[in-house]
Image (cartoon, rainbow, N blue to C red):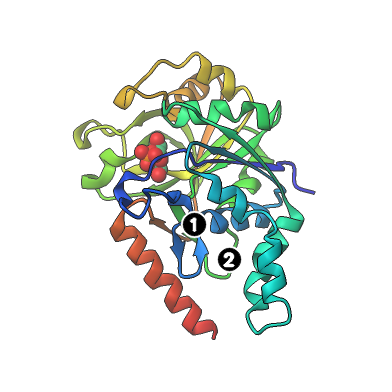
Amino acid sequence: MSIIKKCLFPAAGYGTRFLPATKAMPKEMLPILTKPLIQYGVEEAVEAGMDTMAIITGRGKRAIEDHFDISYELEHQIQGSSKEHLLNDIRGLIEHCTFTYTRQKKMRGLGDAILKGRVLIGDEAFAVLLADDLCDNLEGEGVLKQMMRVYEKYRCSIVAVQEVDREDISRYGVVSGRALDEQIMMVDDMIEKPEADEAPSNLAIIGRYILTPDIFEKIERTEAGKGGEIQITDALRQQAKEGMVMAYRFEGCRFDCGSVDGFVEATNYFYERMQEHS
Ligand code: G1P
């Protein structure tokens, strides 16, 4: 049985880079082929053994709740038709998982969004998945499942990292530390969106975290940082200084679906995969 059961999805952001598409629709509902981004995320969490999805929403995000609920009219309409199978995956998720929600009323940053999830998580280790970062590992294990193995060994907070080009580093949280093996590094420092010449490495944090519950107190004590927002990177830095945080170089690929370029790349990638399987 999996030791981490809950996955937190910060989903309160406005998605301004996708306006006007995100004017009345949550960015997490943008589809890659026929599946919304957040459903890919929930599937990754389920694959890793989790069954409780804690979603931080905000105004204008109701479509997410409706997506993860039964639509009786639709079920009735589609029953016995050739399209019925199109609902199989989402039906399976709805049956298997519990979905819980709370709203972040003011946008105060990712750290604050995670802190708002405390009422849904309680006092246990949990995963965080940013649905914008869409990951795939072909037939291999998904990123959260890989990270669960690391957690089973080290029992501390873990961030997924990936090498990025120097010119892109200022878009990410960046880690430095001591390599324990080819994939795992003990973090000694981390900094949110540094200038390229201040970055301690080219290892960028990707939107997958496993966090131990003491992170909540660390966030409470974290002052506004980059962009005037409460940054999870700053709270994790404190956790690394006082305890232990690991960075994990995951296997697989990742698309930044928060950008139009990344979104189109992901669409092409999944379209090719679909063609291969049909
Ligand atoms: C957030 C984090 C950042 C991380 C990134 C991954 O930034 O603050 O540390 O590298 O997600 O996608 P955002 O992209 O929300 O600005």
Circle on res. 1: none
Looking at the image, tell me whether mark 1 or mark 2 is earlier in sequence order: 1
Residues at circles 1 and 2 in contact by the CB criterion of under 8 Å: no
Ligand 1's image quarter is top left
- Which mark identifies residue 37? 1
The residue pinned by badge 2 equals 140
- Left or right, residue 194 beside residue 6: left
Q: What residue appears at the point 52 percent right and 36 percent down from the top-left corner?
A: 246
Depth order, front residue of 270/201: 270
Secondary structure beneath disc 2? loop
Residue 231 falls in which quadrant of the image?
A: top left
Res. 116 image quadrant = top right
Relative to 199, 141 lies left or right:
right
Find numbered disc 1 in the image and state the secondary structure of the residue it sits on. Answer: helix
Residue at the (47%, 51%) spot, across then down: 28
Q: Position of residue 197 (x, y in %)?
A: 19, 34
Residue plotted at (63% across, 30% down): 212
The x and y percentages for residue 256 are 37, 53
Cβ of mark 1 under 8 Å from ligand 1: the answer is no
